Image (tube, grey):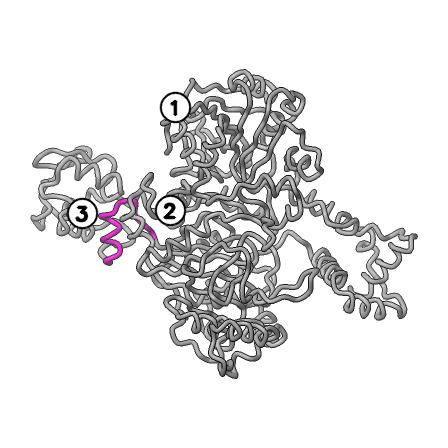
Amino acid sequence: MQNLEPSTPTRLIDSLERSVDLILQTVQGDIVLAIPLGIGKPNPLVNALYRRMAGQPGRRLKIFTALSLEKPPGASELEAHFLAPLVERVFQDYPDLDYVKALRGGSLPAHIEVHEFFMKTGDYLGHAAAQQGFVCTNYSFAVRDMMSHGVNLLMQAVAAEPDADGRMQYSLSCNPDLSVDLLERCRAKQQPLMAVAMVNRQLPFMTGHAQVAPELFDLIVDAPGCSHALFAPPNASISWADYAIGLHAASLVRDGGTLQIGIGSLGDAIAQALLVRDQKPEAFHSILSGLCHGQVQGRELGRFEQGLYGCSEMFVNGFMRLIQGGVIRRHVHADLRLQTLALAGRLNEKPDAAALQALLEAGHIHSPLRAEDVEFLQAHGLFKPGVTWHPDTLQLGTMTLRNDLRDPSAAAAIAQHLLGERWLQVTLMHGGFFLGPRDFYQALRDLPADLRAKIDMTRIGFINELYDDSLGSEALKRAQRVKASLINTAMKVSLLGAAASDGLESGQVVSGVGGQYNFVAMAHALPDARSILMLRASHDNKDGLRSSIVWSYAHCTIPRHLRDVVITEYGVADLRGCTDAECIKRLLQIADSRFQADLMAEAKAHGKLEADYQLPEWARHNRPEALRELLRPWRNEGVLPDFPFGTDLDADELIIVRTLKKLKHASRHPVELVGMILRSLGPEKPVPPAYLERLGLAEAKSFKDLFIKRLFASNL
């Protein structure tokens, strides 16, 4: 549990407006506000402060944050009609942030600034104010950079629940990632910082490092209007390409290792592929053999006998499913001595006599046990809490035992009577923040206490930085993070191995670096880790079909000297230690075949590839139709379903969504649109009236609405 001395005594307040009064009285002059990324924002309190500050042009407000979430409004009138009931059902009373609405609408007051270091993907392309206000920084450097802006106010949503004695206890829940670090550093430098917590009772109460003393805050707001539904993006369907990428990635994850994945359809694809590998290994082997042209040497195909440990800045629904499915089950210890013994296979699932003897043989405890030995054994669950130490004896209640682990009879008595029931301070999942669909949040709320204790939401410095010793030594992290598969997503990869993951060539920011660079660098710093970058081999947008593997790109997130493993739906390119020519060849082999010839010619023209090089025959058929035919039987059998972890959409909504996607795709491709129009000119097909009502087309009268209605019907 985190505990810091507050700058002022903590106050409890039951009114949003009075809390704003107090903030404005306490923080003099301009306000530089830090709020967590994602769902840790105290939206009602932020909105109350924003509205008050908007009316005070004499005081500036600077907001420093990331990932400001907003209910989807729909990109067209048709989408808006469709989304309205879905948004009401899924997002319920989630309050949008006023500053987001103002920023998007161009109505942000001149004295209010918004600076994000990570944006919702693609949401602010072409938005001048958001692009100009973006702060490019690594996730683990965000605290440093907030302090350079002069942050003087921290506001965060927290979970709350009473303890056994009825005293209220608090948790940073979804976002312990940066807040404690910010408070510690500001107070160490005597930089004034008011810390305000707002209680949202919808937040799951997480223990471990997420649980904090109330004294951490100067002000705790627990008022009507504070609690609201959490932002819950529904699961996305998993495409053919995403499943192929996920299956390839799952075949690189080593049993007994460490896993990092992200959010979205690719993260879900990896999680489902890992579950298939563990629960249906024959099916996994067969699917992968098809994807790999029968060459599966070097791939990991077996079940998880030891299980995996999760260590990811983002704790997502895929991780929860892997925990529930028993794949994420490898415990790591918070003590280097125990972790080292665990890696050597000297510790079993529960504390036992063998663990005591292993500690003794390694010189980590003594015989007779010393007082500090007993304290250590109790802290980690090897001894029951009530054991007391004496120089020659150990006592539990009225029982007295001889303190001598080297004597077989005394050691047997100690093991029989004093051993604890389970390990303490063990973790199977470390996360910095979480975000996911509604059932993910409910699963977190419903966690049994012993499992909840093994999911440790903690500081981002601990997770993203190997060399940050704030919560554990580098040596401990290295011992925990063995055989790590650190998996991230990229948008573009150059033939020389550089990756662009967060921005366009124009300088427009798509999202942000986040922690990607840190994990890639960590994979090179750990002796047996691998950095795995995933991307779809091609992408189709308003500019037409384009290859995601390119000769060069004017933006770089990961430099080519950190190239490692790259995955597309067409295979795996292991680039570590390769010459430039071999790197180019391996990436060409997993590129979309519609672009391979031009890419190869470009590489040859620049003198980076032999003039007579030709692609092997097996790599010349990388096309989406071939991939679909390969995976179709497994999709039909339910091994690779569209929504392996469920969906918030009902059956009718799924039909409507698929049809709208077809129309949207055609709207960006004139030839396809013309064909679609021609096919719609025959007799109009019947459409369920409820569908037309949902899309606002039931009473269509204008030419535009009648035209859309006909197109919709012909593609339903």
Give the number of the disc on residue 465: 2
Q: CA distance from mark 2 to mark 3?
A: 39 Å
Q: Does residue 679 appear left or right of residue 539 in this picture?
A: right
User: Which one is nearer the viewer's eye here, 136 or 21?
Assistant: 136
What is the span of residues highlighted in magenta in the rendered image?
331-345
* Residue 105 lies in the magenta-colored region: no
Q: Secondary structure at mark 2?
A: loop
User: Which one is nearer the viewer's eye here, 623 or 353?
Assistant: 623
Q: Of marks 1 and 2, which one's residue comes earlier in the chain?
A: 1
2 and 3 marks in contact (CB < 8 Å):
no
Amino acid type, callout 3: Ala
434 to 348, vertically: above or below: above
Residue 462 found in image quarter: top left
Mark nearer the viewer, 2 or 3: 2
Location of residue 300 in the rendering, given as x and y in whole percent from the top left corner: 40, 69
Q: Does residue 1 appear left or right of residue 504 in this picture?
A: left
Q: Does residue 468 appear left or right of residue 57 in this picture?
A: left
178 to 8, vertically: above or below: below
Q: Which residue is mark 1?
A: 190
Q: Of marks 3 and 1, which one's residue comes earlier in the chain?
A: 1
Going 60% across and 49% down the picture, which residue do you hit?
508
Going 13% across and 52% down the picture, which residue do you hit?
361
Mark nearer the viewer, 1 or 2: 1
Disc 2 packing (10 Å; few <14; some 14–19; many ≥20): some
Location of residue 657 in the rendering, given as x and y in whole percent from the top left corner: 71, 57
Q: Of marks 2 and 3, which one's residue comes earlier in the chain?
A: 3
Q: CA distance from mark 3 to mark 1?
A: 50 Å
Q: Secondary structure at mark 1?
A: loop
Disc 3 packing (10 Å; few <14; some 14–19; many ≥20): many
Q: Which residue is mark 3?
A: 415
Going 57% across and 67% down the picture, which residue do you hit?
537
Q: Secondary structure at mark 3?
A: helix
